[in-house]
Image (spheres, grey):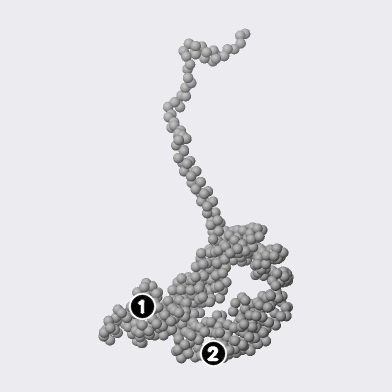
């Protein structure tokens, strides 16, 4: 039996040999037409898109690199304080403890503390700076660099280094300096200066020389006795000045004596005489101010301030004098005596830095312009109609809440125009009295809502309506303190520019607002470190 044949193979071979290759057929699928697949873009077409994407990425990376610090300060304000602490640590390690340009360890730690007062790292850093300053003091003494030693010791004391260590370093410094100074020669020069009457008129006068000796040798008997006698001579001159009615000169001499030796035996009696003379000047100035003698009162208060620039009562007297000038200027302007009003305004400007002067000047200028627009010979009936029309416009502007703006159409402008026409008119006075409570309410509402700019506008209207209202000063202080509170919050968030603006606003409102000087110093420290 023969093996089975593969007919397909043979037939295929035979057919290929006899008729050529026969392709397979798809049957009914051959009638179906499919779409061509989407053609992929070539490299030439993809290239522009890739270039733009790459360029955008490069720009993004470059911008991030260039603005990395501002972005970090904005997103994470605490990183600025951390950076300052790191820079301070580097300055400390390099021995650069303090520098006027703000790059010293002390200044950098203080800037970090101003930005973030709740963290202790900066305080600990300042303690390390104090310890390093003590080490520099001792090293400078050993090298006979006494000026450097004094500077380093001063820094250590400023940063509250341990008292025992600073005192020991100071004693060592005095001993070393005394060995190089020639004490006997200094004593002879001091005695000669006293005999010639040169007590305190230069570095080679008796008292400065004795003080120099005692700084080197505090227990040197000849220097102690010589200083005692020279101070007695100085206080005799002070008594002579008091006898001559010159308390300012006497005060300067007594102050110098107190600086040299606050325990001198003749000092209490001289101070008591000076106090009586000062009180006499104060009482006379107060009396002059009560009697309307503003010029004489201001002269007295300024004399007191030359004696003691920190005399709070004298400072208050100068302010009262300035406000008395302002009140008189406005009264004179209301009576159309503008030349005299301007004179008082100039005097007030010399006495005050208060924004009230600027406000009063605007009010007087408005009154002058309103008066100039009024015909000098306006009949009484026409004047009355004009006043009534202005008061009606005042009421309409007040109903809209337009107390100060827009200029010329505000309630205040209309009321002032009416006051310029008829300052003594009962209806005008009643309108001013009605406006005042509304303006006060405006101030309180805006302040409660922390809308400080609008509160400031309401306060200005209040002050313009009643410049002599004593409550205005308290309101100015409250608004100044609110500016400081908001500024402190923004400073903690790293917004130094806003904090600087808050200092300006607060100082314009009340230059003596509690906490203003301390906050201003913190802002200054932070700003210097940020530059």
Identify residue for label 1.
366
Pick the residue in front: 526 or 185: 185
Give the residue displayed 53% in from the left and 68% down from the top.
487
Identify residue for label 2.
245
Task: Locate residue 174 relative to residue 98 in the image: left or right.
Answer: right
Q: CA distance from mark 2 to mark 1?
A: 46 Å
Pick the residue in front: 508 or 216: 216
Task: Locate residue 83 relative to residue 379 in the image: left or right.
Answer: right
Q: x%, y% of residue 453?
A: 46, 71
Image position of 233 with respect to 97: above or below? below
Q: Which quadrant holds residue 422?
A: bottom left
Give the residue displayed 57% in from the left and 62% down from the top.
101
Image position of 132 with respect to 435: above or below? above
Q: x%, y% of residue 118?
A: 62, 66
Give the residue displayed 45% in from the left and 72% down from the top.
454
Does the image show residue 530?
Answer: yes
Q: Quadrant of the N terminus?
A: top right
Asked if the residue under mark 1 is in contact with the one under mark 2, i.e. CB atoms within 8 Å, the reply is: no
Q: Tell us which disc is closer to us: 2 or 1.
A: 2
Q: x%, y% of residue 370?
A: 33, 79
């Amino acid at each position: 039996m023969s093996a089975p044949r593969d007919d397909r193979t043979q037939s295929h071979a035979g057919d290929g040999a006899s008729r050529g290759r026969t392709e397979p057929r798809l049957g009914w699928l051959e009638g179906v037409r499919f779409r061509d697949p989407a053609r992929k873009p070539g490299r030439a077409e993809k290239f522009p898109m890739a270039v733009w994407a790459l360029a955008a990425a490069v720009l993004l990376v470059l911008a991030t690199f260039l603005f990395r610090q501002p972005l970090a300060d904005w997103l994470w304000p605490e990183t600025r304080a951390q950076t300052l602490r790191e820079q301070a640590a580097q300055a400390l390690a390099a021995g650069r403890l303090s520098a006027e340009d703000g790059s010293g360890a002390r200044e950098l730690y203080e800037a970090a503390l101003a930005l973030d007062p709740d963290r202790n790292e900066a305080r600990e850093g300042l303690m390390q700076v104090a310890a390093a300053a003590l080490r520099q003091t001792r090293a400078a003494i050993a090298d006979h660099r006494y000026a450097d030693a004094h500077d380093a010791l001063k820094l250590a004391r400023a940063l509250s280094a341990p008292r025992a260590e600073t005192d020991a370093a100071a004693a060592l410094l005095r001993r070393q300096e005394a060995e190089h100074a020639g004490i006997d020669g200094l004593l002879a020069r001091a005695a000669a200066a006293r005999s010639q009457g040169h007590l305190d008129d230069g570095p080679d006068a008796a008292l400065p020389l004795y003080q120099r000796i005692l700084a080197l040798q505090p227990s040197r008997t000849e220097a102690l006795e010589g200083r005692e006698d020279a101070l007695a001579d100085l206080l005799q001159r002070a008594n002579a000045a008091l006898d001559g009615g010159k308390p300012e000169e006497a005060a300067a001499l007594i102050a110098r004596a107190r600086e040299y030796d606050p325990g001198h035996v003749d000092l209490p009696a001289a101070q008591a005489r000076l106090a009586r003379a000062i009180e006499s000047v104060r009482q006379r100035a107060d009396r002059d101010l009560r009697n309307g003698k503003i010029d004489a009162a201001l002269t007295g208060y300024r004399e007191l301030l030359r004696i003691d620039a920190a005399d709070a009562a004298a400072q208050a007297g100068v302010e009262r004098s300035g406000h008395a000038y302002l009140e008189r200027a406005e009264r004179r302007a209301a009576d159309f005596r503008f030349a005299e009003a301007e004179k008082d305004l100039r005097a007030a400007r010399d006495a005050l830095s208060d924004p009230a002067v600027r406000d009063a000047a605007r009010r007087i200028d408005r009154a002058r312009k309103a008066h100039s627009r009024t015909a000098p010979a306006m009949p009484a009936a026409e004047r009355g109609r004009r006043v009534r029309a202005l008061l009606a416009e005042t009421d309409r502007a007040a109903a809209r809440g337009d107390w100060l703006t827009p200029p010329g159409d505000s309630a205040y402008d209309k009321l002032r125009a009416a006051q310029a026409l008829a300052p003594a008119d009962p209806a005008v006075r009643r309108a001013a009295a009605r406006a005042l409570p509304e303006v006060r309410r405006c101030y309180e509402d805006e302040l409660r809502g922390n809308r400080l700019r609008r509160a400031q506008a309401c306060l200005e209207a209040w002050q313009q309506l009643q410049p002599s209202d004593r409550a205005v000063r308290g309101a100015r202080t409250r608004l100044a303190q609110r500016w400081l509170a908001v500024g402190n919050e923004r400073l903690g968030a790293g917004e130094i520019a806003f904090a600087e603006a808050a200092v300006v606003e607060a100082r314009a409102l009340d230059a003596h607002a509690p906490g203003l000087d301390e906050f201003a110093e913190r802002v200054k420290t932070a700003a210097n470190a940020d530059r």
